[in-house]
Amino acid sequence: MLRRSFSSSLSKFKHLRRPPPPPLPSPALKTIKESITRKLRSRDSLISDQQADVFNSVLAQIRRAVAAEDPTAVHELWIKLRASNLAHLVDPKLLSSMSGLLLESHLPRDDIEDLALAAASFNAEDFAACMLYHIRSDQPEATLSLYSRSDHIMQTAEDEHSLEFQDDLAFGHADLLQSPSQSIRGRILLLMAAVTAHAMLDSFQGALNLCKDTDVRFHHHTTNDFLERLKYNPDLKKKVEAYVHRLHYARLVSRPPSLSRHITNLGDTKALSALKKFYDGIIQGILGPSPFIAADESFLSSERTVAMTFVGWTSFLTAFLKCSAKDDAARVWDDIPKLGLRHHISMWNALLAGQSQSFTDATATFNTMKTRNIQPNALTYRALIGSLFNGRRPNLAMDKFHEFRRAELNDSPEDIMAVYNTVVNGLLVTNRVDAANSLLLQMSEHGPNPDVVSYNTFLGHFARRNDLKGLGMIMTKMGESGVAGDVFSFSTILSALLKLGRPDASEIVFRLMNKQGVKANTATYTAIIDQQMRTRDEVHLNGALKLLSQMEGDPAVAPNIVTYTSVLAGLYRGPRWLSEQKEHDFTRSILERMKRHNVKLNTRTYNILLKACLQNDRLDQALSYYQEMKRTKVPMFHETWYVLLDGMVGMNEWDIAKEVVKDMGLYGVRPLGPLQNLIQRAVSGGRR
């Protein structure tokens, strides 16, 4: 019965069988043997000549056995390699072919599992089949025992930013980030099998610990694909589905920075429906049946093992306000006391920031804080003052600024400076230049000392008015105070000089940089070029190209792929601002310059350019890049296909989208989550 169960579980993975490698022509065997021996030497200096001969001989026999689809012979040869301590030298791709062959055999399961584990560094799907066998045999402990042996591919030592970025990826809200371990097929199946085992043991916390220890993320398509393997047990399938849903929320909540980033991304992209759904999920995890999220760390318990923080609640409030969803923001505000919490000062500040275009609402909120004895901090005053300036109430804004100064708050220097810079900006926006200069002088004499943001605010003001005298005055003050300019400073000056038709604009800027002791490097040049390209006119384009020429002539600041991509993406950003012919000519010129300097586009940069073209009605250019990727055999990952299909679908180019789907089949792409949904839309021609 167990053998039939094992075969049944393996049949679910029948697509894993790899075709056997073709037989090698005999004249090539000697050369290959010598090559393999050299590789063995480089991989393990302890390999003797005798061991190398044994390995080469067994390897040739394994290839013949795989080609003949002889699992018994493969098994015996694998045992021989293990006994000789040479098994670790087998190529992962060959291991995968060996494992796929043994899976459907009746050989000892321990040996099948050992070989599947060895192959897992290339393809983990065979090992997942072994875990699924134990699940179908009602052996969750054995399943978890197998999973514990896969730590080398399931756990990664990635930095926090990378993890946060991937959190967004899982649900399609950011570009795909590929790590070496993520290229291993089937890791998600291992995680799903382990989660299933914990569900069988009623151990949600155990499942959560697994999810927190790996960078593997759940995707809609792969989750459903695995759940289909559990349809023999509808109750277990339903339970695992609920576990996955809860684990998604619990894992994010367990990483407050990741949670905040995810919520912020939803707000920034105005993804209101997704934001509301996510908020509902959090509330359900706190107040619903079988709660697993605590509203605050003080409410943690054996059941509620992850907790929201005030940063998370504030992020929700801010995101809803960014989406202009006042009712949803009000719901967050009203839910806080219902959850046994008090409104943190950060939430009051977020509410004020959301009222930046309504000084009457902001003033009312500020007064409410005072009546409730909520002590405002520097960021409270910053939000209120900014709202008053936006509402063209500079006198009231200055009254609040004077109140802020009298309060002598013990806030961080950065927050204090933010208030002063908000006032400087407000005075300049309302054309109170003398008052702004007076405040700058007071800051220089009595503190807080002006920072680069303070001076950049003045530079931006004078640049908009083509006031070279004002720009020069501010640069002089920066030099006297020892504040060095940043990319924004020098890009602002360059823009002003270019608009005034100064042919020596870039030379002037770099003389200023040298005078301030700012050493120009590739990153500095690239950032300034990017700023110029964002202006989207020929004057600034020519300025950017002149900087690019300077970089190309100086090995110390030679342009890199990021530099050239900034120029190319800038050509396609927004509605067409050059004639079609000029855009084509500039594109060709940049690509030729890249070729001369041996700078090649890679997958990541192609994706950026494809996205820029497709989002801005440049289909022909996008298709040109796509054909070039195929011609030059540049690797295409899920991100590439997603960008292509998303662009085609968005432009209603259904015929081309279907051709892309066909290409995906030729490339052997296995779509996941949002990409699978796009494929369905493309194939159906947009019909829901």
Image (cartoon, grey):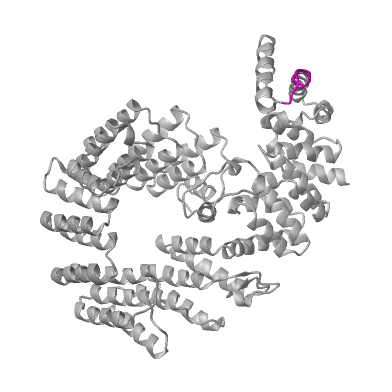
Q: Is residue 616 above or below residue 249?
A: above
Residue at the far bottom: name it: 371
Q: Is residue 617 visible?
A: no
At 76% across and 42% down in the image, what residue appears? Answer: 10
Q: Position of residue 411 (x, y in %)?
A: 39, 74
Q: Inspect the magenta stretch and tell me whether residue 47 lies in it.
A: yes
Q: Is residue 529 above or below residue 307?
A: above
At 69% across and 42% down in the image, what residue appears? Answer: 125
Q: Position of residue 514 (x, y in %)?
A: 24, 45
- Depth check, front residue: 683 or 70: 70
Image position of 406 (left or right of 257) = left
Main SS class of the magenta portion in the image? helix
Image position of 420 (left or right of 40) = left
Stretch of the chain drawn in magenta:
46-56
Q: Position of residue 368 (x, y in %)?
A: 38, 87
Image position of 550 (left or right of 345) = left
User: In which image quadrant can residue 44 be found?
Assistant: top right
- Depth check, front residue: 163 or 467: 467
Q: Inspect the magenta stretch and tell me whether residue 112 lies in it.
A: no
At 80% across and 28% down in the image, what residue appears? Answer: 81
Q: Position of residue 68 (x, y in %)?
A: 77, 22
- Depth check, front residue: 208 or 685: 208
User: In which image quadrant can residue 622 be found?
Assistant: top left
Q: Is residue 380 visible?
A: yes
Image position of 501 (left or right of 234) = left
Q: Is residue 209 above or below residue 432?
A: above
Question: How many discs mark residues in the rendered view?
Answer: 0
Residue at the far right: name it: 1
